[in-house]
C-alpha cells in the first residue's frame, strides 16, 4: 500500500528560475490538493483537482503558479520566476470518492528554498 | 469565513504526564468536519481523527481522546500518559461540507515536546 509521493523532496533554486514539483496520489483517490506551509504555520490551501479538473484556486496562487493533473492521476505544480517569498514546504494530499468529506492523506512534501 | 485557533504555540511536559491541546473553530455552516493531524520531525502530516458536526460523542483511541463541544466551538485533544514519541506539531483543521473543494483550514499548530 503506497501513500502519496512527492518529488523532489528538496529543491534549491535561484531567484527568477522556474521549478516544477510532482505529486503522485494514492491510486484510487480522485481528489488531489496542493497546500503550502511556511515555517511555524499550518498548511494553507492552494488548489484542488477532482480527477483532471482543477475546480478551485486560492488567491495565494498568483499567476506565476500553475498546476495540472492531465490524466487525473499525478499532478504537477510549477512556479515561474521564483521569488524568495516562495520558499516553503509544498504539500500534496489526496482523498477518495465524491459526495462526502473524507480525510486527506498527505505526502512528505517538497521543500523549496529560493536563494 | 472559517477559522481555526490553536492558542497554545508550544507545550512541554515530562513523560507520563497527561496533556491537552486546545482547538477553537469558527464557521457559519451547520455541517462541517473537524480533524487532527500530527506532524512529527520527519515532516509528513499524519491523519489522527475526523469528526462531523452532528456527532458530539467523545472518542478514545488508546492514549488519545478527543472532546468535541459545539456549544463552545471546541475540539480538544488529550494525550494520556504521554511518551517521547508523541513529540510533534499537532494541527487542528476544519472543512465545510459543500460543493467544490473541501479544503482544510488549519490552525497554526501546537508544538508538543515530551521530555524523558
Image: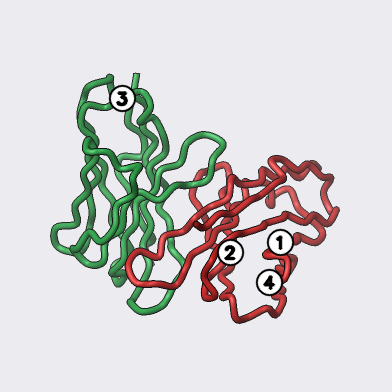
Chain colours: A green, B red
Label drawn at residue B48: 2
In the picture provided, is B55 more to the left or to the right than B82? left
Instruction: Indicate the secondary structure of the residue bearing disc 1.
Output: strand
Distance between the Cα atoms at labels 2 and 1? 10 Å
Q: Are marks 2 and 4 in contact (CB under 8 Å)?
A: no
Q: Where is residue B108 in the image (x, y as percent from the top left)?
A: 58, 45
Foreground pick, B81 / A114: A114
Instruction: Indicate the secondary structure of the residue bearing disc 2.
Output: strand
| Tag 3 residue | A83
The residue mark sitting in front, 2 or 3, is 3
| Picture quadrant of residue B41 | top right
Q: Do the residues labelled 2 and 1 touch (CB within 8 Å)?
A: yes
Q: Do labels 2 and 3 share a chain?
A: no
Distance between the Cα atoms at labels 2 and 3? 34 Å
Which is more N-terminal, label 1 or label 4? 4
| Tag 1 residue | B77
The residue mark sitting in front, 3 or 1, is 3
Relative height, residue B86 to residue A83 (above, below): below
Q: Mark 2 lies on which chain?
A: B
The residue mark sitting in front, 4 or 1, is 4
Which is more N-terminal, label 1 or label 2? 2
Instruction: Indicate the secondary structure of the residue bearing disc 3.
Output: loop
Distance between the Cα atoms at labels 4 and 1? 15 Å
Q: Mark 4 lies on which chain?
A: B
**Residue found at x 19% / y 63%:** A53
**Residue found at x 26% / y 66%:** A50
Label drawn at residue B70: 4
Q: Position of residue B34 (x, y in %)?
A: 57, 66
- Answer few, some or many: residues within 10 Å of disc 1's Cα (few below 14, many 20 plus, some between 14 and 19): many
Residue found at the far left of this picture: A70
- Answer few, some or many: residues within 10 Å of disc 3's Cα (few below 14, many 20 plus, some between 14 and 19): some
Label drawn at residue B49: none
Amino acid at each position: 500500500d503506497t501513500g502519496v509521493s512527492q518529488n523532489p523532496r528538496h529543491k534549491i533554486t535561484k531567484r527568477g528560475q522556474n521549478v516544477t514539483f510532482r505529486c503522485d496520489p494514492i491510486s484510487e483517490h480522485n481528489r488531489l490538493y496542493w497546500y503550502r506551509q511556511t515555517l511555524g504555520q499550518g498548511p494553507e490551501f492552494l488548489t484542488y483537482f477532482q480527477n483532471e479538473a482543477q475546480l478551485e484556486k486560492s488567491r495565494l496562487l498568483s499567476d506565476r503558479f500553475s498546476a495540472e493533473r492531465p490524466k487525473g492521476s499525478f499532478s504537477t505544480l510549477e512556479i515561474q520566476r521564483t521569488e524568495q517569498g516562495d520558499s516553503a514546504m509544498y504539500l500534496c494530499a489526496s482523498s477518495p470518492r465524491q459526495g462526502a468529506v473524507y480525510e486527506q492523506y498527505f505526502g512528505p512534501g517538497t521543500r523549496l528554498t529560493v536563494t | 469565513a472559517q477559522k481555526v485557533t490553536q492558542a497554545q504555540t508550544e507545550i512541554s511536559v515530562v513523560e507520563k504526564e497527561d496533556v491537552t491541546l486546545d482547538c477553537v473553530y469558527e464557521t457559519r455552516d451547520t455541517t462541517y468536519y473537524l480533524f487532527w493531524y500530527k506532524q512529527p520531525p520527519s515532516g509528513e502530516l499524519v491523519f489522527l481523527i475526523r469528526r462531523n458536526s452532528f456527532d458530539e460523542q467523545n472518542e478514545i483511541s488508546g492514549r488519545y481522546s478527543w472532546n468535541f463541544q459545539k456549544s463552545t466551538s471546541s475540539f480538544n485533544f488529550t494525550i494520556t500518559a504521554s511518551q517521547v514519541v508523541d513529540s510533534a506539531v499537532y494541527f487542528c483543521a476544519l472543512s465545510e461540507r459543500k460543493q467544490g473543494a473541501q479544503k482544510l483550514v488549519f490552525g497554526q499548530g501546537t508544538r508538543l515536546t515530551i521530555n524523558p
